[in-house]
Image (spheres, helix red, strand yellow):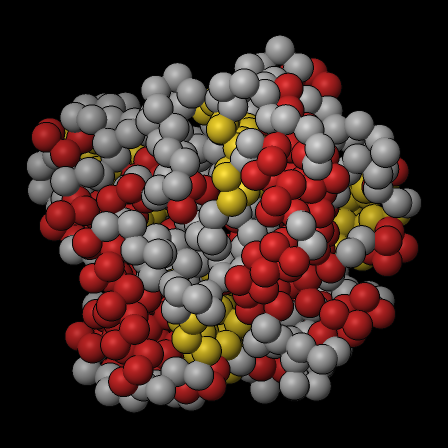
Amino acid sequence: MKIQGSVFKYPDNVDTDVIIPARYLNTAKAEELALHCMEDIDKDFVKKVQPQDVMVAGWNFGCGSSREHAPLVIKTCKTGCVIAKSFARIFYRNAINIGLPILECPDAAEEIQAGDRVSVDFDTGVITDETTGKTYKAEPFPPFIQNIIKAGGLLASLKKE
Amino acid sequence: MGMTMTQKILASHASLPSVSAGQLISAKLDMVLGNDITTPVAINEFKKAGFSDVFDKDKISIVLDHFVPNKDIKAAEQSKQCRQFACEHCISHFFDVGKMGIEHALLPEQGIVCAGDCIIGADSHTCTYGALGAFSTGVGSTDMAAGLATGTAWFKVPSAIKFELSGKLPENCSGKDVILTIIGMIGVDGALYKSMEFCGEGVSSLSMDDRLCICNMAIEAGAKNGIFPVDKTTLKYLKGRCVREPRIFEADKDAEYEKTVKIDLSQIKPTVSCPHLPENTKPASELSDIKIDQVVIGSCTNGRMEDMEAAYKTLKGKKIADGIRCIIIPATMQIYRECVEKGYVTAFIDAGAVVSTPTCGPCLGGYMGILAEGERCVATTNRNFVGRMGHVKSEVYLASPQTAAASALTGYITTPGRK
């Protein structure tokens, strides 16, 4: 699978409270929640994001709360993928479990700039910055996790068993 | 090669003779936990996937604690959904208003979690129960749904950092100052994907409430779990609460650690995390010019009896400074009741504080103490991210109950005195 989109760039330690503030967590409806995605650090994100656009961030993306609402709102905004130097562990699990594509790639996360056009090939882990022409190789997922992703998430993979 | 304490618990629950860091395993769960925010998402996923039965009604806890008593209509609907699911599946450990407490104070108090357990909870602070010598970690709602259905979870076996504790804390410090100091040292991703294993002769001087507070904030260093060895304090705490026999696991002598951090407890100072990351720590003494608007004493980090005692000792017979709102939240109904019986609640009210029934409310900016633009709060909670307690331009300073109570009296961040 391949995607191509424009980059929204964020710093280190983007926490789940800014991805989706807890004041909105009185509902579990993804469409309603998604209206507030990133609003405390980037009010324009929801207005500007187009299908397959890519979030690029620093270390420890998704730190803080275990709220699955965080990867869920990013996915619901039709974001194609999140590339970060590293992910907080619960966010990492949640993203895999709900089928939000994420890639760990410190070099790409460092060099790719906001607004760049980027394409990502999930089968090979190759990230291409179309604006600069530079390519990067992300760490592939272990086979166990690839199977969860291929099945369409954790529960779908359990049902298969 | 030897195993860490965490690895031994995981090996036992995966029915494997040994495991090593990086290995992917499926482990049997002793407890699956959710709250009023995360359980509705889990229920939806559980149903969507076509599951009809839970794996074991006695190994599931559902605690309504974040937005209860219901803060608005939507929150009421989420509570109702949890209540109906709990009723439908005869969940033994379902805690509604009147019985509830903040989950991570409530489960240990009620003896629902035990040494040697393997626990997941759809709440990041589930790592708290490591204080009892359990492997316990926070997950999302889909993991909770899978746990509800199958009683198992997948884990990547973590490597570990060893924290060797020596000495004894000064009287004006508590477990909170220890964990804030550690997070200041290693950073908010300093233990990412790893276990934080606490050991050394200093452990015996730490109370169970101190240990619960320290493990509670392991997630704030990015850790998968925090864990203490089982000792006399643990066994005394479990006795009479937990009907199950504690299972004691010890790290092997040749267990491998990524590094060892030595902490002399006697050198710990009252510590404050400044906005907007828990790693931005400073000694409270360097922040005496920070003027505040609100103090919150409570949460899964610091709403236990010793925290209430610390607040009481500081506030009794005194007056909270003019212009300061002080909100005190005992973490469970049992703690609340004990605060009433011991006269703490009267002393808090006489000092000018308000006392709320248990709720996570203000910690995550839900309700019961939201901050306006430009306001500052000293809180015994666990996160000080942008907008965490209200307006994006408000500020949260994380501190111990001693420091928070001392600050309430002056209106500025204040170093608690030695008795």
Q: Is residue B281 above or below residue A53?
A: above
- At a point 10% along the width and 30% down the height, the residue shown is A47
Indicate the position of residue A96 as horizontal and vertical percent values: 32, 60
Q: Is residue A73 left or right of residue A58?
A: left
Which quarter of the figure is the C terminus of chain B placed in?
A: top right
Q: Is residue B293 left or right of residue A39?
A: right
Indicate the position of residue B244 as horizontal and vertical percent values: 65, 86
Q: Is residue B144 above or below residue B93?
A: above
- At a point 50% along the width and 77% down the height, the residue shown is B31
- At a point 25% along the width and 77% down the height, the residue shown is B84
Q: Residue furthest top?
A: B289
- At a point 20% along the width and 62% down the height, the residue shown is B77
Q: Residue A155, can we see it?
A: no
Indicate the position of residue A19 as horizontal and vertical percent values: 30, 39
Which quarter of the figure is the N terminus of chain B placed in?
A: bottom right
Q: Is residue B6 above or below residue B281?
A: below
Q: Can you tell which quarter of the image residue B386 is in?
A: top left
Q: Is residue A142 above or below residue B244?
A: above
Q: Nearer the viewer, residue B215 or A81?
A: B215
Indicate the position of residue A159 as horizontal and vertical percent values: 25, 82
Q: Nearer the viewer, residue A26 or A134?
A: A26
Q: Can you tell which quarter of the image residue B172 is in?
A: top right
Q: Nearer the viewer, residue B125 or B237?
A: B237
Q: Residue B85, can we see it?
A: yes
Tally of numbered discs: 0
